[in-house]
Image (cartoon, coloured by chain):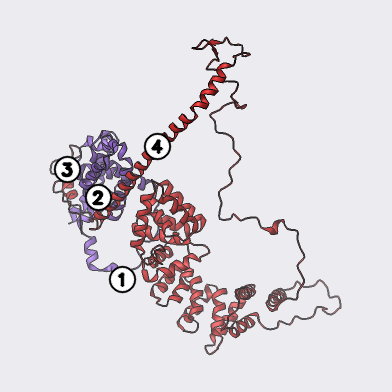
Chain colours: A purple, B red
Amino acid sequence: MGSTGDWSALESLVADQLPAALAFAGRLTGDPDSAEEIVQEALFRAARAWAGFRGASQARTWLYRIIVNVFRDRMARRPHDELPGDLPDRQSDDPADLAEAADLGRHIAGLVSALPARQREVLVLVSYEGLSIEEAADLLRITRQNVHSNLHAARERLRKQLLPQRIHR
Amino acid sequence: MHSDFSPDDVHSPDVDRSPGDPLDGLLARARWDAPSPESLPRLRRSFREAAGKHAAGRRRTWASISLAAALLLIATVSLFPSIRDRVALREARPAAGDGRDPRPGIDGRNVANPSTPSPEVDLPHAPLSTSPKPQSPAPAAPTVTDRAPTARAAAPEIAAPVRAPNMYERLVVASIERHSASKPTPPTAAPTGRANERPAIDPGPSPVDEAVTRLASNEEQGVSDEEFALLIATLTTEREHNQQRLLARLADSAATDRPAAARLLAEIGTPASLDTLRRLFVAPDTRPAAAYGLARLEDSPRLVALIQSESDTAIRGMLLSGLVERDDPLAVAALLEQIADPSRAEAALAALSTARRPPIDRLFGVLMGPRIDRRALAGRALGRIDGPIVTSRLVALVLQGAYQHDAMLALVGSRGSDAERFIDLARHDETLMASVVWAERQFAVLFPQQHKRFIP
């Protein structure tokens, strides 16, 4: 596919998959800005690698694999930003902000996006992107058993974090 | 604003799940912040640019290969007669002296064993090896402490002409002598019966008084940097004592030389002077001098609060000059906040560009940190520092591809000649040109008032 230098096919793939790819990256990172940056880097890599893409896997899987690789690179190399989260700000005690911060949906999303990287990848791919165990294993280039164990660990971790809270609600 | 993804039924495979697992219901309620509406158009645009660049690059590559092949063909054709004559000459020579039987050629003449090098070929005497050729040690990478050898090191020592000490040198000598005289002298073992032959040292005027007078009398035209440095050096020989003298002078609120005294206190004061400096900061005549002292002595939270509330650009610049020397997280966060404010950015960047020890490592930490907004600001700050060491670290990041965009953003904003050279090279590099375009565009969006290429 890519070996023919068919740029229109790549453009079509990107046009079709870009919103979903951005959402996927957002679930991985938990931050829309970082997601945009990861997708941008992934698109650069995709443009570079398109000539070598032989169509052995689905184009969507190929693009998601690049996104996962960019995400892993950043996770592996990024040192901790030690600066304070925000400077003292009078708006920080705004009731509207507090209400938003308490929103359950965002809280759950935050917990998912704070999982260890591999667990996060597996959970997002399987639970939110709808991939099967085999597809996730193929995309992440790990064994099915590895996908199983990471998925189990992720769910148990979230269960401990989420279900006690639900009892009190 | 939240993602429109609404997984009413989160897909769970056959593992770790029992029917009606409440965890799935919770996971289905997860809501991620949606990307900004500009994200998708921005990504599409940058992708089109990247794809276009790569396509053009590939076309250029194929064109280059075709051109090279054509040139090779032309060269072969043009050299063919020469090669043919050379081969014919070699074939005409008898293959003798090598101990091997000559083999007949296709035309009946003898040709040398093809596996044997022709005696006409100069073989290298050294054995061929795949190991890398030993090289002389590479010169060490330049470091911060690298300095070109000075002429002074090689030049013979030349006796300096003798001259009379000036007033400041006399002040230094007097201060040292007074310091020596104030030390308790050990008791002598036995009186010799002679009177102490050493004459009593007249302490003379206090160096503090002289310095204040000197500064106050030159308030309008000011003293030179060298003179001021000498004054400070004089006063720091007895810092505590002189600080007390200055504080005593400043206690007189009616004194006309308070700005001069405040200026000296700002330079030599210790944290014990902080309360006085804070009071001086409120008075209009001593405010600038006190600002410099507070920039040096105030703790970071209070200094940050002062900077945030200060509306006078000059005073804020003085306060910032202390902030940019501090290698602590709060100070760096406050610096980035200033850079983010278009009305305050230039003052912060100017202070950073003159800092002696800016927090480079911490800024690189932010550049490689998780917050995209701060990464861009750290890149802006590092770009303004633009020393050769910072530039080389940024270039290394770009080439490693680890934080290519942020480092490229910093280089685009740099005023250093090394950075400009690199950007010019990167602009013509197939793998970097898209990143340069992106960085320039981002820079123009994020720092429209500071983009050197957009400002005439």
* Nearer the camera: disc 2 or disc 4: 4
Going by the numbered disc 3, the residue's amino acid type is: His
Neighbor class of circle 4 (other Cα within 10 Å; few <14, some 14-19, many 20+) is few
Q: Is residue A24 left or right of residue B191?
A: left
Q: Are marks 2 and 4 on the same chain?
A: no
How far separated are the C-alphas under marks 2 and 1?
A: 33 Å
- Please report, as a chain letter, where disc 2 is located: A
For label 3, the crowd category at 10 Å Cα-Cα, with few meaning under 14, some 14 to 19 and many 20 or more, is many
Disc 2 with disc 1 on a shared chain:
yes
Comparing labels 1 and 4, the label whose residue is closer to the camera: 4
| Residue A30 seen | no
Q: Secondary structure at mark 4?
A: helix
Looking at the rendered structure, the secondary structure element under dot 1 is: helix
Question: Which residue lies at the image location 52% right of the left edge and 10% below the top edge?
Answer: B108
Residue marked by disc 3:
B11
Disc 1 marks which amino acid?
Arg
Could you give the CA–CA distance between mark 4 and mark 3, rounded to whole angstroms? 51 Å
Whole-number angstrom distance, CA of label 1 to CA of label 4: 63 Å
Q: Quick one: label 4 or label 3, which is nearer the N terminus?
A: 3
Q: Which mark, by number, is residue A22?
A: 2
Badge 1 is on which residue? A90
Point out the frontmost of discs 4 and 3: 4
Quadrant of residue B207 within the rendered picture: bottom right
Q: Mark 2 and mark 4: span between their CA atoms?
A: 38 Å
Q: Nearer the viewer, residue B122 or B179?
A: B122
- Horizontal and vertical percent position of residue B234: 65, 74
- Residue under disc 3 on the same chain as residue under disc 1: no
Which residue type does callout 2 highlight?
A: Leu
Specify whether B16 is left or right of B76.
Answer: left
